[in-house]
Image (cartoon, rainbow, N blue to C red):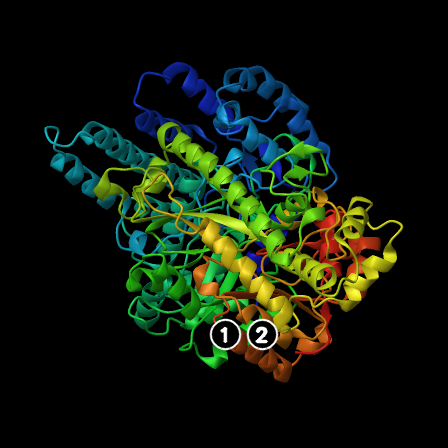
Amino acid sequence: MITQRVQKLREESVNTQPSISIERALIETEFYKANFGKYPVPILRALNFFEICTKKSIYIGDYELIVGERGPSPKAVPTFPELNCHSAEDLRVLNTRELQRYTISENDIELYEREVIPYWRGKSLRDIIFERVPADWKRAYECGLFTEFMEQRAPGHTALDGKIYKTGLIGFKERIAQQIAKLDFINDPEATDKRDQLEAMSISCDAMIEFARRHSLLAAERAESRQVSEQQRDDLKEIARVCSRVPEYAPQTFHEALQMYWFIHLGTITELNGWDAMNPGHLDIHLWPFYKKEIEEGTLTRERAKELLSCFWIKFNNHPAPPKVGITAKESGTYNDFTNINIGGINRDGSDAVNEISYMLLEIAGELHILQPGNSVHISRRTPERFLKEACKVIAKGYGYPSVFNVDAYIKELVLQGKSLEDAREGGCSGCIEVGAFGKEAYLLTGYLNVPKILEVTLNNGVDPMSGVRVGPATGDAHTFNSFEQLYRAFVEQLNYVVDLKIGVSNYIDRVFATRMPATFLSVVIDDCIERGRDYYNAGPRYNTSYIQCTGLGTVTDSLSAIKMHVFEKSTFTMERLLTALSNNFEGDEVLRQTIINHTPFFGNDNDYADSIAKRVYEELYRAIDGKRNIKGEFYHLNMLSTTCHVYFGKVTGATPNGRHKGRAISDGTSPSQGADTNGPTAVIHSLGKLDQTKSGGTLLNLRFLPSVISGDSNSAKLASLIRSYFALDGHHIQFNIVDTQTLRDAQKRPHEYRDLLVRMAGYSDYFVHMNRDLQEEIISRTENGGV
């Protein structure tokens, strides 16, 4: 049961309107005006971080046990003008837009316009990047062939391992000092750069120690007030004690361990606005030694531990994603910042990791029912069936959480990429569905690839029919293609061109971050940045992976299936008729569209005709991306994630040969096209099981069930069996929406009655009534399964 304290904190978090805080931007701008050019870049960034940590407002709320906010209060989101500087218009749009609104006063907008914008105009990384990108990249980007993650936020898809629970920041400073003492200024040409980086990392540790000390002093001061109750006084004294220890020293208690992580988390998301947010990784594994010890000693009860965990859980919900700039500020996105707490899995030695905290975290996820943090259960062959069934009971509540990951499959993926077996076992998911080696890897998402758009460009000889602009090589007039293989070869040529175009600029942007915007605090807690004397963005981590997220496998598969069968095999219609229908959005030829929809093998139905095409396209994506070099001496890898980008990509893609109308969402992740899977969920998992998912760094499967199908223990057991069956086929990930169409339609009509309706989008959950109409319709269009 939820305690009174937790209920009050939850209500405050849920009911607080997200806002924009300009405090960080003002502190940073003043610092840069006085200090830019005086220090090496890493030291400049570290001193800037120290300035923020010593000057920003400190907040300790009533009833809190875990303390610290990125902004001056809960849900107050800072801006990061060094990366992307919001215009006054952006801020006014964010303050007035109907969905995902961020409030900001007109006085603050005027102050921002007067003090912040003039300094950063032309100096922000986004301005620098777009000034230098080649014209052919910009044309492809603007027509929607791909997106670029790092033009809005810093790269930082990162989760921690257990080192921070064993070593305080004072210990990291000692390691840094030892590495500085070892530098060879005679034989190592990078020694000076390494010294600058290491000194900057040490300064960043000092910044967070001071940040925690300020919380300790404030808590102690408030504890002396006559206006607080005895309970509040005791809480504040304990907060003061905890914050005087961590993060400077390693935690010794369960409470200290939670606060330790939270300070590290705040440091990384205050330093830069990494995409996605920092993640605690396998929280249940990290906390277990503290819990076990205190339970045995009698200094902690299960109830107190759960209350502390619940307070910790709510802190994530206090931190909405930093809003974007430009045209994307006008489009409602999500408040979700994609923290993903991994539950379950296996230990570094390969043994099952499920413990009492694992079950406690499932209880909390089910009871609190809030947007953040994201959470996922990690299932291996060793995972107890009881744990999976308990997870299925939470899934059946219909909150979209937890998603489910196949530990055995992603360990294969990570080992195939070059990780050690032990590091792979310690890894998991950060963000949506992408996996990496926790605490040892920078695994950065570079942007989404619009695969159906590439086919559209192929059918138009390298021209984007939506804009009339040439965005690819001339690969032949589709009217003249004599065989499916000729068309497919042209598609592959366009694919490789677009991938190489994207990688070239992504590598340039990587280098911009490495040289201009080091993450000196994040580097402290990621192996082997200290040992290498290199930044997180500059090949410091043990592993350095770049991902391209490919979107629309179902749409492109079904489109190729329709062309192959009806144009080249059965001659149901000509290529000319098809292309005319596509250019007219099927107006005037609904007969052709219905022929495609009703007489074409589609992916997701365990049909080898369609599934063989999906497998072929998947392998083509793998060959186009996997093994291409990034700037850190390592490689790009394939990822099959869409988040909400399949909706955006749909808006910039014309009608497609599978019968999809212009502007409608393309398929998400590796899921079938919306409504194309008609043979039930077992057929879907069999289709996806034909893909070698271990070649990717993540695939995404969405399934939707009627609530009646999943309710009750026996149906939860059936859902668990479906998950086990899919994972036996090396499926990487699966997630569920447990909601019927009527409920979703009612929510559209009466949103005020459905404020708490959480649904699963594509890698994360969001409030249905906070989504724009396009996103809502995409959810509704998914196949509604009436059986497991």
Vertical side of 742 occupied by 89: above or below: above
Amino acid bearing label 1? Leu
Using the image, tell me which numbered label, if any, was put on residue 192: none
Residue 527 location (% of width, % of height): 28, 48
| Residue at image coords 46%, 53% | 623
Task: Report the number of discs.
Answer: 2
Real-space CA distance between mark 1 and mark 2, rounded to the nearest whole angstrom: 8 Å
Residue 353 location (% of width, % of height): 37, 71
Amino acid bearing label 2? His
Q: Secondary structure at mark 2?
A: helix
10 Å crowding of disc 2: few (<14), some (14-19), many (20+) = some
Looking at the rendered image, the quarter that the C terminus falls into is bottom right
The residue that disc 2 covers is 686
Vertical side of 62 occupied by 162: above or below: below
The answer to whether residue 401 of the structure is visible from this angle is: no
Taking the image as shown, residue 502 lies to the left or right of residue 353, namely right
- Residue found farthest to the right: 588
Vertical side of 267 occupied by 238: above or below: below
- The foreground one among 679 and 475 is 475
| Residue at image coords 75%, 60% | 781
Pick whichever of labels 1 and 2 is earlier in the sequence: 2
Taking the image as shown, residue 656 lies to the left or right of residue 443, namely right
Residue 346 location (% of width, % of height): 37, 69
The residue that disc 1 covers is 729
Q: Secondary structure at mark 1?
A: loop
Q: Are marks 1 and 2 in contact (CB under 8 Å)?
A: yes
Looking at the rendered image, the quarter that the N terminus falls into is bottom right
